[in-house]
Image (spheres, helix red, strand yellow):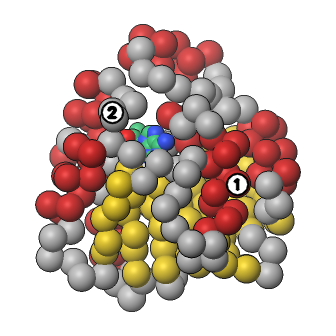
Amino acid sequence: MPVMSTAERWFCQSAPWGWMAGRLILGWALQGVTARGAVLELGSGSGAMAAETIRRHPECQLTVTDVDPAMVTAAQRRFADEPQVTVRQADASGLPFADGSFDVVVSYLMLHHVIAWRQALGEVSRVLRPGGQFVGYDVAAAPLTEWAHRAERSPHQLIGRHELESALSQVGFESVSVRSTVGGQAVRFTAGEPG
Ligand SMILES: C[S@@+](CC[C@H](N)C(=O)[O-])C[C@H]1O[C@@H](n2cnc3c(N)ncnc32)[C@H](O)[C@@H]1O
């Protein structure tokens, strides 16, 4: 069930992306939130961000998920020798986890591919423990990102900053922060599950 174009799928598995994700993007995306306890990554692709997460936070238990079986297979290969990493196929809009299973849920550059993204936010809230945190980043609704995704012809739904902010509050998150970045082409967000 691939939801990205061939070019996007290739890029997400490429060495340059793996390098950037690890060296440049992870710390910026986490915004000071610590990957602690049980951590769930949504739409993790082949696991570029997850690999750096486990390198920096070897004490956490990381569950790596993606809806695309090819990405799941690539991540399974990558983490075959990492006992603290579990790889599962999962659609973010219907997560196969019990309520309150995770301390932290992370989402990097994937929410805009989830057509039922509001439902996915509800699922994140459901699987977080009281006091848990949701953190990540995504491309935002802007002319350049809209054009790029139309050219790619991949299913997408670009989300505006205020739209994301109010949707996070509506599903019950507290301390919601959605900040515009990269000249308005992206947003970074953090949200807390009530304690
Ligand atoms: C642009 S890639 C980003 C991959 C990874 N987060 C990273 O930063 O390297 C988006 C990923 O989201 C996945 N995806 C799209 N829709 C999804 C959904 N509904 N549930 C879970 N994963 C999804 C895609 O298969 C793809 O692997």
Q: Residue at x 26, y 25 (%)?
A: 6
Residue 171, given in percent of the width and then of the height, sits at 79, 55
Q: Residue at x 33, y 33 (%)?
A: 2
Q: Is mark 2 within 8 Å of ligand 1?
A: yes
Instruction: Specify whether 149 is left or right of 80.
Output: right
Q: CA distance from mark 1 to mark 2?
A: 23 Å
Q: Residue at x 57, y 47 (%)?
A: 93
Residue denoted by label 2: 2
Residue 122 got which mark? 1
Q: What residue type is disc 2 on?
A: Pro
Q: Residue at x 60, y 27 (%)?
A: 157
Residue 124, given in percent of the width and then of the height, sits at 63, 60
Task: For mark 2, give the secondary structure.
Answer: loop
Residue 136, given in percent of the width and then of the height, sits at 57, 55
Res 190 → quadrant: bottom right
Q: Is mark 1 within 8 Å of ligand 1?
A: no
Mark toward the start of the polypeptide (1 vs 2): 2
Q: Is residue 183 above or below residue 16?
A: above
Instruction: Using the rendered image of the protein, determine whether residue 91 is visible from the camera's viewpoint.
Output: yes
Q: Is residue 192 above or below residue 82?
A: above
